[in-house]
Structures are given as C-alpha cells and as structure tokens.
Image (cartoon, grey):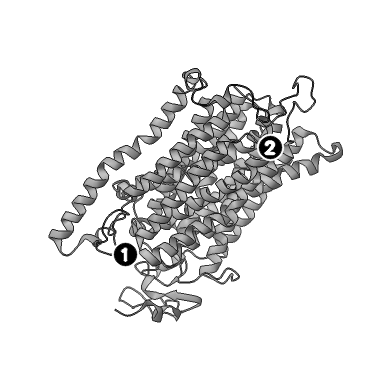
Amino acid sequence: MQSQDQYAGLASPPLHADDAGVHQRRTTFPIRTDPLQGDKATEIKLLSVARPHMRAFHYAWLSFFFAFFGWFSIPPLMPTIKKQLGLTADQVSNSNIVSVASTILGRAVGGPMCDRYGSRTVQAVLLVVGAIPVASAALVTSYTGLMFARFFIGLVGCSFIATTYWTSTMFSREVVGSANALAAGWGNLGAGATTLITPQLFNLVTTGGALSDDMGWRVAILFPAFFMVVTGVALYFNSDDCPQGQYNDLRKNNAIDTAATKPAVDMKQGLLHVAKLPVTWILAFQYACSFGVELQVHNVLTEHYYEDFTYSDCDPQTDPNECRRLTQSHATLISSLFGLMCLFARALGGYFSDVGNRRCGMKGRIGVQFLAFAGQAVFLYVYSTTTNLSTSVPLLVFFGIFVQACTGSTYGIVPYVLPSFTGATSGFVGAGGNVGALCWSLMFKGIGNRTTSFKYLSIFVAAAALATFGIKVPGNAALWEKDDSVHGGLAPTEVDDESVHNGKEAAQAAHLLKYRIHNFFLSILISISFPVSILISNVIPIRRQLLFSGYLYPEFLPASPTLANPV
C-alpha cells in the first residue's frame, strides 16, 4: 500500500467528467492536502487565512467565540440584574436552567441541518438571528421577560455543532482532533472573555454616574449582539462549505458525490442511525460531564465567589458590602480564569488525542479520554472541599484545564463514530452536553449549597471516566479488548459506517454481535443517568439533615471562617 505522504501536497487530480455535466475541480491549494480524503488539509497553518481550509478554520472559531460571548453575557452581570429586577435566588437558578434547556433541541437538529445545508449557512443564520434575543435582553423589566430572553439566547449555543462540523469537513483524520479542539477551544474562550469584558463595560458606562446601574447593564449586553451580526454576514460571503467550494455550486455542477462533500441527507434518518449506536450515548454522557459541567460552572461561578466567600467575623446587617470579600468585578475576574483556559486546554485534549491515535490508533484516543476525565474528577472534588479563597483559585485553574481537555478529547473521537453522518453524531453528542447542563442546574437548585453541589458533580465526572471502558467505535477494539478489529489500530477512513463489517461475513458478523451485546447493557445504564441526576436533585433537600449529620461532611455544620453557609 502506498504511503499517504505522497498525496499530501498541493496538487489534486481533476474530477472525472460524466454525461450529466462537468465540474472543474480545484487542483491546487495553499496548504498540504490529501486527495484520498476529499482534499482535506493534512496540516494546520494558524497564521494563514487562505481559502478554503484556513479561512474556514478561523471563521469557525471566531463565529463560535462571539456566539458564546452573547450566550454568556448575562451571568457576569447577574448580581446587578438580580438587584435591579428584584429576583430571588430560585428565579436566578430558573433563568440559568432555561438558558441551557433551549439549546438541547437546537443541538440535536443542528447536526443534520449541517449535513443538509452546510455548516457555513447554519452558522451564519445562528449568529444573525441569535443576535436579536441578545439585544432584546436589554429591554427586559421583569422575571418573565428575562426568562424569555435567556431561552431564545440559548439557541446560539448550537453554533458549536456547526463549528466542529466545519473543521471536520476541512481537515484530515491526521489533524482533525487538533483542528476541532483548537476551533472549539478558542470559540469557548468567548464565555471567559464575556465574563472578563462585560463587567468592565458596565463599570465604564456607569463611572461617575454617567449611567445608572439599571441602564448600565442593558448597554453592556448590546456589545456582543453587534459583533454577532458582523461576523455572521462576513463568514457567509467570504468562506467555503468544503475544500471544493460551496455545496450549492457543487450540486448544480453534479459534483456533490465527491469525497470532499456530503449529499443532502434526511435529518430523521441521520438521527436514527446515530441513536442506534451505544457509543454515541456514552460520548453524550461524557460530554454532559465535561461541556455540561463547563456550562453550569459558567452560570454559577461569579455568584459563588461573590456571595459565598465572606468574612466570618462580620455582621451582614451593618456592613455596607454585606461582609463579601469580593466585589462583582473582582468575582468576575476570578471566574474568567475558568473560561480563559479554553485558549489552550481544549486544544491540548485534541492534540493528545491525535498523539494517542498515531501511537495506538483508536485505543490511544480512548486512553487519553479516560485520563482527562479522571483528572477532571480529582480536581473538581478537591476544589469542592476547599474553603480558602487563595487556594480555590489555582484549583479552579487546574479544574478548568482538565474539563476543557475532556471536551477536546471527546470530539477527537466523534468524527470516527459514523463518518457518513458526522453532523448528526456531532449534534447528538453536543446535545448531551446541554442535557447535562440542565441536569446539573436542577441539581444545584435542589441542593441549594453550591459547594456541596460541586462535590456531587465530581462523582458524576468520575462515573464518566469509568464509562470510557465501554467506548467501542465500529471497526475498532475497545480499550480493554485485543485489537483484532477490521481496522486494527488505525483510525477509520471516510467509509460508510456499515461497510466496515462487510467481507469475511462469518467472523465479522460474530464481531458485530459481540459489539451490540456488549454495549446493550451499557446503553441502558447511560440512558438512565440523566433521570437519576434529576431525582437526586429533588431527593437531597429532603434528606439534607441526614446527609449532613456531621458524620459525612462535618465541615458544613458550623459556618466556615471564609466560606458562607448559604443553607
């Protein structure tokens, strides 16, 4: 078999012409490509903005950045919004819940939409349309209005699916893990950036009484809406769907059947194919314990540092700052550290996933997945036990690194599950992240104590680490199995998901049967995890006196010297 390196150059063979019409295939690229993988790039040149590969890469992460900037523009200002609108703690929790609930359906549908219309179009529509509720949030005057605004703002969270689909379309399997992780990580940075920038904008417009606090927060959240519109319009007219151009042009020229593109697929068919594989349920659960955790932490972290860290020898009734150790600005500065880890940590997860793939094939990717989740569980648990402000900050940083690495390693596996339904798979797993965020929001609300909630959350993350041993990508061995699969230790190419089981029918039919039996019980276990988390969130408040009797968590009986007891 010839080495792929001889194909990884600038030249690509012309497209075969048929009687129906001829499409002049692009034959040169400003980056190394592999024609055997549909002219996907085999390298990443971060300083290049040349079309089609690197232009799409930079628009993918930039659009995702501003989508998240708008999505999380409200939580950093929540202390002010809570005061100005007269909200209760439960109402704030409800608004956090609804902001992630709306994204679940959008993510499930967003993947097949990318399969059908292309990620460029889907991303542009999400940004331009999503800017409307972001800007409209400045007009809310009541709890009901805030709930409606945050519900529709949550729809822009679907931009993640278009981002990873876009990079998966442009980059070959050798670098797709790194490309996905870089684009998604830099895009996720928008959540940290808005935590850092939005409160400073609020301070700027309210300095010296220029604007009231009530008007200041409204002006501050208009900032992301403007950039969402500008970015959405720019990427639509200045980028490409795939290495060969735009899907519509390729269809008109009868070139949609090339390896560089994907035909329009039925959305229902794509989701059904994806839902039949237990591995997608496991990855969805793991994404709930990584990206879902990230979303929940973004929603509560500013309030955690602002409200929970107080002086113990102080009377909140007489102190003008209610004994809080941090101002809103200082709390958001610390909280932004968690989101700023996206700058490199998600890419780190994707990079090590690619390294593992080169050394051990799919087993390498799965091994990296286990180590990342194990590290996240450890640091989250330790973070939940600390009551010292100076200690919590470095622990938050390390926890943020591992949670981002988990998201990167997860999407290092996703493109290999069903290559013919990449968008549907990405959307299904991505929706798991939002389902997880919804469940964690309900759990935090039910428990009432943010510190205790973090501790319970670490248990779910540990379960996700153990679930790694159940991951079995079609055509590849599981982490604990002997590598005697169809593809051996190599990552699968762009072949149909069913074709890997063709040939040598007797042996491979037995292999497929073993695969389905092995994962049947795992799929049942994973599918009930989300309802169980919701059940726990409602049962724990009833049993709180039993759970915190002093034998299990004695540190929560007296008020901590540095951490308030919100119960």
- Is label 1 or label 2 in front? 1
* Percent position of residue 41, x then y: 46, 71
Q: What's under tag 2, amino acid-wise?
A: Leu
Q: Earlier in the sequence, mark 1 or mark 2?
A: 2
User: Splitting the image into 4 quarters, where does residue 83 fall?
Assistant: top right
- Residue, far right: 208
Q: Nearer the viewer, residue 246 or 437?
A: 437
**Residue name at image x 40 percent, y 35 percent:** 530
Tell me the SS state at disc 1.
loop
Q: Nearer the viewer, residue 504 or 70?
A: 504
Which labelled disc corresponds to residue 121? none
Task: Decide if residue 2 is on the left or right side of residue 106.
Answer: left
The residue labelled by disc 1 is 489
For mark 2, does the 10 Å Cα neighbourhood hold few (<14), some (14 to 19), or many (20 or more) residues? many
**Residue name at image x 61 percent, y 30 percent:** 145
Residue 532's place in the image compared with 65, above or below, is above
Q: Is residue 245 something that shows in the picture?
A: yes
Tell me the SS state at disc 2.
helix
Residue 85's place in the image compared with 210, above or below, is above
* Percent position of residue 161, x then y: 47, 52
Q: Nearer the viewer, residue 22 or 386?
A: 386
* Percent position of residue 86, x then y: 68, 24
Q: What's under tag 1, amino acid-wise?
A: Gly
- Can you say which quadrant of the picture contains the C terminus? top right
The residue labelled by disc 2 is 77
* Percent position of residue 536, x then y: 43, 27
User: Splitting the image into 4 quarters, where does residue 187 fall?
Assistant: bottom right
- Can you say which quadrant of the picture contains the N terminus? bottom left
Task: Decide if residue 219 is on the left or right side of residue 48.
Answer: right
Distance from disc 1 to disc 2, alpha carbons, whole Å, reads: 49 Å
User: Splitting the image into 4 quarters, where does residue 533 fall?
Assistant: top left
**Residue name at image x 57 percent, y 31 percent:** 450
